[in-house]
Amino acid sequence: MPYADLHVHTTRSDGQLALEDVPAAATEASVPVVGLTDHDRLQPLSSPVVERDGVTIVHGIELRVESGDGTRVDLLGYGVERTADLERTVERVQRNRRERGRAIVDCVEDRLGIDLDVDVEDGFGRPHVARAIADHPDAEYGYQGAFDRLIGFGEPCYVPREVPSFERGRQVLAEACAVVSLAHPLRYRDPADALELAAELDAVELHYPYGRAVDRDPVERAIDRHGLAVTGGSDAHDDRLGLAGLSRAEYRALELPAPVR
């Protein structure tokens, strides 16, 4: 079991775990440290790292960005100190998320002739739409089928998001966070290109539950070549924490602030 699961989502984006329930879920999984990395959204935490019910909670964020060649990757920021630039960036992204969410919902409802009855708010994403489709009695698609046939890339109700450039996102996060890491590098269409971007960051996510056998050697070579720190986590969107993460030594090597009680 890992010591620190630094990739966890809550109901503040597309996770199913409420913020106040994180300590109990972490205790159940025997994970002493949790990093909250909701998509493009900040947490209502008073400090970069806090302690809640005996669990260390790291204020993090997952921000999608686009490089000059059109490659889109996710950056993980840890130990967030709010800055005006970061707050403005997040608000712009959330505004676009809401506009995009409404467009996807309208398209699905028109195409299927149903009412999804969803509230499009901050943190809204395609998983919310997929769950609503899967739960609707008159829809013929399950959760994955909704992505495969309706809202996935290239499907009829897919709407692209506007995201910051890699340079802008990296700069904003670097000014606000103690550590900036490249998320799940082996999930991208071209992992080699993604790992080259990591050269401008502090760390890369080495430990991740890809759900299949993967060759982590390219990630480890990038760590050695660029002198990167290691991050890791389960990318939890439910209440199952600790599927992947850092050892105690790896977490301490990040040199994040001590938790405020």
Image (tube, helix red, strand yellow):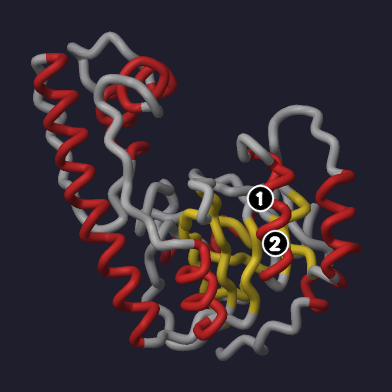
The image position of residue 65, as x and y in percent, is 47, 57
Residue displayed at 32% across by 40% down? 160
Contact (CB < 8 A) between labels 2 and 1?
A: yes
x, y percentage for residue 53?
A: 56, 75
Q: Where is residue 87 in the image (x, y as percent from the top left)?
A: 33, 78
Residue at the spot x=80%, y=52% of the render? 1
Which residue is at 77% across, 53% downward? 206
In the visual, does 247 lie left or right of 64? Answer: right
Q: What amino acid type should be assigned to the residue bearing mark 1?
A: Ala
**Quarter of the figure with residue 117:** top left
SS for callout 2: helix
In the picture shown, does residue 251 fall above or below 186?
below
The quarter of the rendered structure image containing the C terminus is: bottom right
Q: Residues within 10 Å of mark 2 (few under 14, many from 20)?
A: many
Who is closer to the viewer here, 77 or 242? Answer: 77
Q: Can residue 29 be seen in this view?
A: yes
Q: Is residue 241 above or below residue 146?
A: below
Q: Which amino acid does the dot numbered 2 rest on?
A: Ala
Q: Residue 222, relative to residue 125: is it above or below? A: below
Residue indicated by mark 2 = 198
Residue 219 x, y percent position in the rendering = 81, 50
Q: Can residue 51 be seen in this view?
A: no
Label 1, secondary structure: give it.
helix
Q: Mark 1 points at which residue?
A: 194
Residue situated furthest top in the rendering: 140
> Splitting the image into 4 quarters, where does residue 101 fall?
top left
Of 160 and 77, nearer the camera is: 160
Q: Distance between the residues labelled 2 and 1?
A: 7 Å
Residue 91 is left or right of residue 175, and the answer is left
Q: How crowded is mark 1: few (under 14 residues within 10 Å), some or many (20 or more)?
A: many
Report the side of 138 relative to 91 (left or right). Answer: left
